[in-house]
C-alpha cells in the first residue's frame, strides 16, 4: 500500500509542476460497473490524479453489471453501491462526474432497458448533487453538448438508444425522426464549432479491435475455453472455429461492430460530423484500452474499469492493453492534447503509454 501511494505521489508531483499548462483534465473510465479487487484499486488511484478546478470524470457506460439498475428494493441497493464506488472518490475531491448509458445499463439490451436507465438516472437525481449527472437524459438519443473551454466542446449521446431492440410501439414509430434530428444536430454542432476541438463521447466506439470487433485470432480458434478462463489452454481447434462462426451468424447482436444496425450508427455519425478536422471519439464497450489513429480519425477506447478482453493487432492501433485500466486526457494551453493510459499492474497502478496529439493528430 505504501509503495502504491508513493507511486501515485510520483505522478501527482510532476503533474502539479506543469498544471499551469493544462487547461482541462478529463479522466475517462468505461465499463466499471462491477466491484472487484482491481476496480476498487484503479478508481481511487484515478481520483489521485485530480488537478483542482481543472478535472472532470466521465464514466463511459456499463455502469452497473450485469443488467443495470435494480428495479426492486434489494437489487436497487446493490446497484447504488456499485454506482457509489465509481463517483464517490471523485465527488469527495469536488470533481464533476458524468455517467452515460451502456448496453448493460439498458438491461443488457433487454426488455426492461428503458425502465432501468430511468431508474439509474432517478437515483442520481435523488442525491441532489448538481455536479453528478446522467447524460444525455434517460431515454433520449441526445446529444448533450457542453463547452468545457473556449476551444473544447464535448458532445455526448446514448449509442445504445440507437441499437436497442425493444423500443415500444410509440418509440419505434418516432425513432426514425429522432435519428434524423440527432444527425442534423451533429452536423450543426460541427459547423458551429468548426474551429474547436470536438470530443464525441458514446458507449459504443466508431472503431475497435476488441471482442466486439469479431476479429478472432488463431489462439481463439485453437483454445476456445480461454473465453471462459484466460488460463485454460486446452486445444479444441474444431470447436474453437465454431464459436466465431456462430457469433457472427446465429448469435449475432447489434452490440458487435459488424452488425448492420451498428454499421448504420457508425456511418451515420461519422458522415454527420463531415470533415471537421478536430474530432476525437471517446468510448468504452470493448474491455481494454486502445488508441486508434488513421489519418484524421482518432478513437480512444477506455472500457476496462472492471472487465477485460483481448485486443487484436491492427495497423491503425497505436496502443492496446487488454486488462483493467483507465485513460487521462489533458488539454494544454498550446492546443496540444495529451492522452495517457494507466493500467493495473499487480497491486499497483502505473502509466503504461502516452501520446501527444495536435489537432487530433499524433505528434512524433
Image (spheres, grey):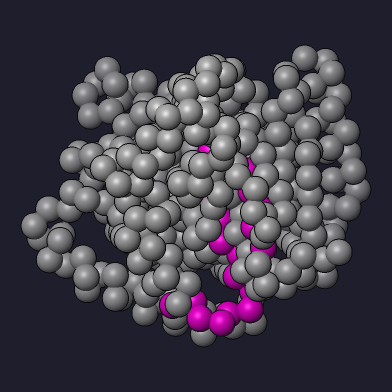
- Across and down, in percent, residue 265 comes to 37, 64
- In the depicted view, which residue is nearer to us: 144 or 166? 166
Residue appearing at x 61%, y 23% in the figure: 38
- In the depicted view, which residue is nearer to us: 15 or 361? 361
- Image: 267 above or below 78: below
Judge left or right: residue 179 versus residue 13: left
Residue appearing at x 40%, y 27% in the figure: 239
- Image: 43 above or below 254: above
Query: Can I make out residue 21 in this image?
Result: yes
- Image: 355 above or below 28: below
Residue appearing at x 70%, y 34% in the figure: 343
- Across and down, in percent, residue 191 comes to 51, 85
Q: Quadrant of the N terminus?
A: top right
Quarter where residue 177 is shown: bottom left
Q: How many marks?
A: 0
Q: Residue furthest left?
A: 169
Whether residue 259 appears in magenta in the rendering, the answer is no
Residue appearing at x 23%, y 29% in the figure: 71
Range drawn in magenta: 272-293
- Across and down, in percent, residue 171 comes to 15, 59
- In the depicted view, which residue is nearer to us: 6 or 283? 283
Quarter where residue 278 is shown: bottom right
Judge left or right: residue 239 versus residue 322: left
Judge left or right: residue 273 versus residue 110: right
Judge left or right: residue 24 versus residue 100: right
Amino acid at each position: 500500500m505504501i509503495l502504491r501511494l508513493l507511486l501515485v505521489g510520483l505522478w501527482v508531483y510532476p503533474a502539479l509542476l506543469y498544471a499551469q499548462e493544462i487547461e482541462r483534465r478529463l479522466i475517462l473510465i468505461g465499463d466499471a460497473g462491477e466491484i472487484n479487487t482491481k476496480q476498487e484499486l484503479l478508481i481511487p488511484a484515478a481520483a489521485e490524479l485530480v488537478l483542482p478546478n481543472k478535472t472532470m470524470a466521465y464514466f463511459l457506460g456499463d455502469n452497473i453489471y450485469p443488467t443495470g439498475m435494480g428495479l426492486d428494493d434489494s437489487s436497487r441497493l446493490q446497484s447504488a453501491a456499485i454506482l457509489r464506488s465509481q463517483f464517490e472518490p471523485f465527488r469527495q475531491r469536488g470533481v464533476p462526474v458524468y455517467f452515460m448509458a451502456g448496453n448493460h445499463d439498458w438491461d443488457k439490451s433487454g426488455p426492461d432497458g428503458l425502465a432501468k436507465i430511468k431508474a439509474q438516472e432517478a437515483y442520481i437525481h435523488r442525491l441532489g448533487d448538481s455536479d453528478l449527472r446522467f447524460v444525455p437524459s434517460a431515454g433520449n438519443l441526445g446529444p448533450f453538448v457542453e463547452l468545457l473551454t473556449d476551444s473544447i466542446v464535448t458532445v455526448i449521446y446514448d449509442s445504445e438508444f440507437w441499437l436497442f431492440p425493444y423500443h415500444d410501439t410509440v418509440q419505434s414509430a418516432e425513432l426514425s425522426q429522432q435519428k434524423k434530428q440527432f444527425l442534423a444536430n451533429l452536423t450543426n454542432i460541427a459547423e458551429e464549432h468548426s474551429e474547436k476541438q470536438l470530443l464525441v463521447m458514446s458507449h459504443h466506439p466508431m472503431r475497435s479491435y476488441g471482442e466486439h470487433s469479431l476479429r478472432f485470432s488463431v489462439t481463439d480458434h485453437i483454445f476456445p475455453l480461454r473465453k471462459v478462463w484466460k488460463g485454460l489452454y486446452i486445444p479444441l481447434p474444431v470447436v474453437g472455429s465454431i464459436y466465431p462462426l456462430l457469433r457472427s451468424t446465429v448469435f449475432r447482436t447489434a452490440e458487435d461492430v459488424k452488425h448492420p444496425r451498428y454499421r448504420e450508427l457508425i456511418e451515420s455519425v461519422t458522415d454527420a460530423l463531415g470533415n471537421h478536422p478536430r474530432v476525437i471519439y471517446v468510448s468504452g464497450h470493448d474491455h481494454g484500452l486502445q488508441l486508434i489513429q488513421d489519418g484524421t480519425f482518432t478513437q480512444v477506447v477506455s472500457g476496462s474499469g472492471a472487465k477485460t478482453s483481448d485486443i487484436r493487432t491492427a495497423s491503425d492501433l497505436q496502443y492496446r492493453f487488454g486488462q483493467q485500466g483507465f485513460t487521462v486526457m489533458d488539454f494544454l494551453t498550446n492546443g496540444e492534447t495529451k492522452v495517457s493510459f494507466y493500467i493495473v499492474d499487480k497491486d499497483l497502478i502505473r502509466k503504461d503509454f502516452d501520446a501527444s496529439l495536435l489537432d487530433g493528430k499524433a505528434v512524433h
